[in-house]
Image (tube, rainbow, N blue to C red):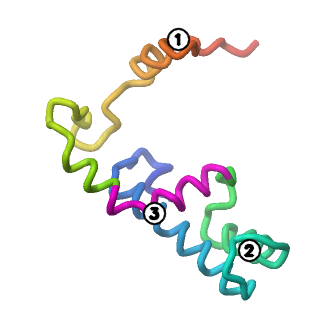
């Protein structure tokens, strides 16, 4: 997680963070002695392991998505390998996200989102 928080948001770092979160979920299920990610003992164990491994500040829906990504990394990699080169956005300076914040907001404006953030008073 520390790499992602320090502007090293590369695909391998995202994959590693997703895999680590899936491992945390597995640890919590083992500690709660359950095969399903639910129930009070699981939630208590999950809370403990999330805090221990630095995932406690991530919203639970995002954590669920990250676990699903970790479970499907192989399929995602196969899909990514089949994309034509002209459909890929090259990384800025070899590692940075390819779009600036302004470019991203411009693209999001097509979905009805404001192009610029409203400055807070």
Q: Say which quarter of the image contains residue 46.
A: bottom right
Q: Sequence order check: which comes first, mark 3 or mark 2? A: 2
Q: Sequence order check: which comes first, mark 2 or mark 1? A: 2
Task: Name the outermost residue toward the left.
Answer: 85
Q: Sequence order check: which comes first, mark 3 or mark 1? A: 3
Residue 48 is labelled as: 2
User: What SS does tag 3 mark?
Assistant: helix
Left or right placement of residue 109 versus residue 34 in this view: left
**Mark 3 to mark 2: distance in Å?**
21 Å
Residue 115 is labelled as: 1
Task: Name the outermost residue toward the right.
Answer: 40
Percent coordinates x, y for residue 31 in the rendering: 71, 86
Q: Nearer the viewer, residue 84 or 115?
A: 84
Q: Is residue 71 magenta?
A: yes
Q: Say which quarter of the image contains residue 102.
A: top left
Q: Nearer the viewer, residue 111 or 8?
A: 111
Percent coordinates x, y for residue 70 in the rendering: 45, 63
Residue at x 25%, y 32% (from the top left corner) = 89
- Bounds of the magenta span? 61-75
Q: Nearer the viewer, mark 3 or mark 2?
A: 3
Residue at x 14%, y 36% (from the top left corner) = 85
**Mark 2 to mark 1: distance in Å?**
40 Å
Left or right placement of residue 114 versus residue 8 in this view: right
């Amino acid at each position: 997680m520390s790499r992602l928080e320090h502007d090293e948001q590369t695909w391998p770092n995202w994959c590693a963070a997703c895999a680590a979160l899936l491992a945390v979920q597995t640890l919590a299920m083992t500690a709660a002695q359950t095969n399903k990610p639910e129930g009070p003992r699981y939630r208590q164990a999950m809370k403990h392991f999330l805090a221990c491994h630095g995932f406690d500040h991530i919203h639970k829906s995002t954590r669920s998505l990250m676990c699903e990504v970790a479970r499907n990394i192989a399929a995602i990699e196969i899909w990514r390998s089949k994309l034509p080169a002209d459909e890929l956005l090259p990384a800025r300076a070899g590692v940075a996200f390819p779009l600036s914040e302004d470019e991203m907001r411009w693209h999001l404006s097509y979905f009805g989102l404001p192009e610029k953030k409203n400055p807070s008073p």
